Amino acid sequence: MGLRRMGTIAGGLLLFARGYAEAQSAGVMPAMPAMPAMRATPAVSLAVPVMSGPLSLSPSPPVIDAGALGTWYVDGAFSALGLAQTNPGAGDRAAIADVSNAQIFVQKTEGLARFYVQLGAYALPALGQTYAHETDAGSTPAKFFDPVPQAFIKIAPSENFSVQAGKLPSLIGNEYTFTFENMNIERGLLWNQEPAISRGIQANLIAGPVGLSLSVNDGYYANRYTWLSGSASWTIDPDNSLVFAAGANLGESARNTLATPIEQNNGAIYNLIYMYSHGPIMLWPYLQYSTVPAHPRIGITDGASLYGAAVLASYGLTPALSLGVRIEYEASTGAGNLLYGPASRATSLTVTPTYTHGRWFARADMSAVAILHGTQGDGLGVNGNRKSQLRGLMELGYAF
């Protein structure tokens, strides 16, 4: 079944439930178990969407009692941003106002059969990349993952074992796809090298402090199911955990789009991530290595490798005010171009204060990207000959 169609079916089930209740009240259809209107629920912990903080969704989201179809949780995120930058790339602008999120999440988290559907509009700002405008013609969803960016069914025989299939968040990386999920508004340089959302099937197993996931998928949204990805996590204690994640294309794909960069999609990528969280402090350093061999048949004439390291940290100054910092370094080797030209190097710094009031939030990104070594024409700016870029972003929103 097509994944876009899955989102349509989930929405149709919602409409069916409402329509049935209306028909029953009019005496047109026989009675079935009562289906109350959407209401608040006691505190629950929802696994998706994943939130690294400091933002969070409501611990008591509205619910729909869907009778035999179970309990459905509904939450969402709505936000707008403004951006100012130096050295914009070709087709970019020095100042931008945009919708960063207008998304609703519907999910069923209990029982054998479960599901998650995320739908709406979104922007994907990333350091050192031309900004993809949600409100322009040919918007971000059309260029990337469509208006239903994530949707999957999940079969869970137990709480320790499950299998899910659909449009899944990647197992790779230490930052998530959407702005509201992360401590910074923009994704970083290392995220630019990682798959974000993949279509496929994934098995998950939890054995005490160890968590294992294995997935067969289409990598960088290539629609060719030749990628094998996996992750292994170890919860050392409540404050410390370690994750190893890896993925590789076992085949070959000539697809080349914004969501599917041909070089990265035909390579392999590895992460080693350490996570520390205690009280107001969160510290997530990680290492990344990716390699792309030559594939002359599809136009990749030269191989290349990329080494990266990043530190993401957040500190809660008060219950309402926090400060997030991200520092990154990347260096490429080989004749292929994975960064800013062959054998290029770059670094970045991002600082993000965040203020929350109830479900409302306001935050700002101040970031700098510097190319330490690059190739003329492959750098920043309209002509690719600039070696730095400064950006300032402000995001205002509501998450429930």
Image: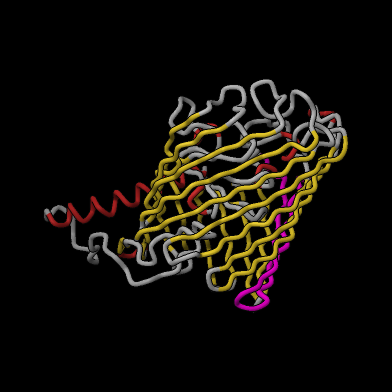
Kindly indicate the quadrant of the structure image that contains residue 291: top right
Q: Is residue 222 left or right of residue 339?
A: left
Q: Residue at x 56, y 33 (%)?
A: 85
Q: Residue at x 57, y 22 (%)?
A: 91
Q: Which quarter shows the C terminus?
A: bottom left
Q: Is residue 249 left or right of residue 99?
A: right
> Residue 276, position in %: x, y?
64, 69
Q: Residue furthest front?
A: 317
Q: Is residue 395 left or right of residue 61?
A: right
Q: Which residues are magenta?
A: 224-250
Q: Residue at x 47, y 41 (%)?
A: 122
* Residue 111, visible in the rendered structure: yes
Q: Is residue 136 above or below residue 50?
A: above
Could you say which is closer to the camera, residue 248 or residue 224?
248
The main secondary structure of the magenta stretch is: strand
Q: Residue at x 41, y 70 (%)?
A: 44
> Residue 351, position in %: x, y?
57, 50
Q: Is residue 241 highlighted in magenta?
A: yes
Q: Is residue 262 highlighted in magenta?
A: no
Kindly indicate the quadrant of the structure image that contains residue 145: top right
